[in-house]
Amino acid sequence: MNASPDPSSSEPNEMPTSAEKTTTDSTPDSDALFDGPRSIAPVTQLSTRGLFLSLAAVCLFPLITLSAYAVIFGKASEHKLPVSVIIDRRPLPTQDGTKRLLEDVIVIENEADFDIPNVTVNLNGQYFLYQDKPLAVGEELVVRQAAFATKSNQRWVPGRYRLDEITVTGKLPSGARGVTEIQY
């Protein structure tokens, strides 16, 4: 095998000589100046209609799903929690236990024939109290209003704020969450 070119072959010489190379490099091709960058990746484009439909689907899917869930399972307040709620002033023992002071309290009484676990009470939808111990049958839970706090630990001050709503939630024997809402 000879690597030298065959003069009898009809194919032109592909490799330019050094003289040809310098002349072609010094005169740039006019088409090469205006060529933009070439992309080797496939280009996918989304039409305006496709964009609108995909955005509508992304926004409407959660709305339709949550609406169907609400229609099928109903509101949590449809499961009534059998408790009575009273706003009162009662004498409560002080920390040292020697005296009793009259304080603003909320009294929650279990009127059901079963214990109610996971009792949560909130005032005006902002101040919360959670009781870990189940509320026994006929038991009365007396809670100082000053014991309620927000999630950022700001305390409820009786008399400073108007008490508009008390919500009591707890777990029913069926496993559903029972709710009692009282508006003032």
Image: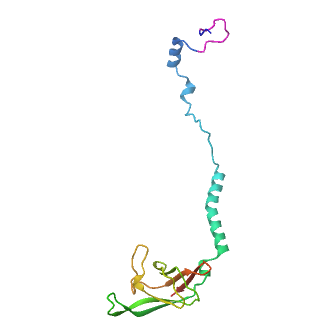
**Nearer the observer, 37 or 82:** 82
Asked if the magenta segment contains residue 70, the reply would be no
Q: Is residue 4 left or right of residue 85?
A: right
Q: Is residue 18 left or right of residue 99?
A: right
Residue at (53, 86) in percent of width and height:
182
- In the rendered image, the vertical position of residue 14 relative to residue 64, given as above or below: above
**Nearer the observer, 71 or 39:** 71
- Horizontal and vertical percent for residue 40? 59, 35
Quadrant showing the N terminus: top right
**Nearer the observer, 17 or 81:** 81
**Nearer the observer, 17 or 144:** 144
The dominant secondary structure in magenta is: loop
Which residue is the extreme one toward the top? Answer: 8
Q: Is residue 150 left or right of residue 64?
A: left
- Horizontal and vertical percent for residue 4? 59, 8
- In the rendered image, the vertical position of residue 102 relative to residue 41, given as above or below: below
Q: Which residues are magenta?
A: 4-14
- Horizontal and vertical percent for residue 142? 45, 89
- Horizontal and vertical percent for residue 152? 41, 72
Residue at (64, 12) in percent of width and height:
12
